[in-house]
Amino acid sequence: MSALTLVTPQPGIDAASDLSADALDYGRAALSENTMRAYRGDWLEFETWCVDRQRPYLPASPATVANYASSLASAGKKVPTIARKLAAVRFFHRGAGEENPTDNAGVAAILKGIRRTVGTAPHQKAPATVDVIHAMLAHVPAGTLQGKRDRAILLLGFAGAFRRSELVSIAVEDLTFSTKGVDVFLPKSKTDQEAKGQSVAVLNGKALRPADRVREWLEVAGIESGPIFRRINRGDHLTGEALSAQSVALIVKKYADLAGLDVENLSGHSLRAGFVTSAAENRASISRIMEVTRHRDPRTVETYVRRADRFKDHAGDGFL
């Protein structure tokens, strides 16, 4: 029997047989869908690895976990990826009421060695700054339905600093247009897992005019309710199916390629990172940037600010 049938999304929650179905459902909702999906995939990978080597996976021994982590490092996996996969192992063991095999001095030593050998510096995608956005927009066809949709996606994603998952979940009912721009209400997001709701003010501005492009797209497409960004089939035929988050990344890469930009270093997240970087270069304060990005930790934004300012007021200015 697969371990996925024995353990559950919430550690320890399904081991209690006296809980009602509603209680179990609320327990499973403690983690976001994306996190749970990643954990399930990581656990299945660990389970397969163990079965191929005839090792028990539930419970797994600390030696098995250490060997698994070593194999991931040897396969070229980055430290954050390895850490996430071990988090899934820990998560499902706790869910089954088993002892956590990752909480072991030997495993900790192996991970420390991996960090020293592989390194912990994250690979960050390049930001799609305002100049990059202009370069991509120059290659978006203005006369097609797909072109109008893609233009609206690039501009709204950039101007609202939206995550890919947030961008494709926006519905017509979440938009409130005004002379200044458009307010976008997010019922739930990565930093709002309890669904209190967040509102993002997207300024129309004078150059890019993202609110106008979104309104134009909705009018041309005849979308009056539901998801604003939908799949378009061959022949420029609009469907009722919402775009996936991965589609945003593909759209960014498509126009980056047409503009002759570095496709490998640009992704869907580049739109969000591009807004932060452009705002920092424009000397916006961290607090004002966070009003748009909804970052909870200012240190995250400071990383972008330092990167944008690294040549300004340089210590070598004046003698180099």
Image (cartoon, rainbow, N blue to C red):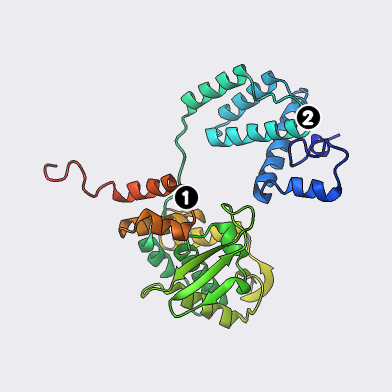
Which comes sooner in the sequence, label 2 or label 1? Answer: 2
Q: Residue 291: x, y in percent?
A: 45, 59
Of all residues, the one furthest to the left in this rendering is 319
The one nearer the camera, 89 or 139, is: 89
What is the spatial separation of the Cα atoms under label 2 and label 1, in whole angstroms?
43 Å
- Taking the spot 50% from the left edge, 58% from the top edge, the residue there is 253
Measured along the vertical axis of the image, is residue 144 above or below residue 37?
below
Label 1 crowding class (10 Å Cα cut-off): few <14, some 14-19, many 20+? few
Measured along the vertical axis of the image, is residue 319 above or below residue 101?
below
Decide if residue 267 is on the left or right side of residue 11.
left
Mark 2: amino acid: Gly
Decide if residue 264 is on the left or right side of residue 197.
left
Q: Quadrant of the C terminus?
A: top left
The residue carrying mark 1 is 264
Q: In this orientation, does residue 114 appear?
A: yes
Q: Residue 17: x, y in percent?
A: 88, 38
Q: Residue 244: x, y in percent?
A: 63, 60
Front: mark 2 or 1: 2
Mark 1: amino acid: Glu
Q: Which mark is drawn over residue 142?
A: none
SS at mark 2 in the image? loop
Measured along the vertical axis of the image, is residue 69 above or below residue 28?
above
The one nearer the camera, 268 or 232, is: 268
For residue 108, which quarter of the picture?
top right
Q: Are marks 2 and 1 in contact (CB under 8 Å)?
A: no
The one nearer the camera, 181 or 259, is: 181
Q: Quadrant of the N terminus?
A: top right
Q: Which mark is drawn over residue 97?
A: 2
SS at mark 1 in the image? helix
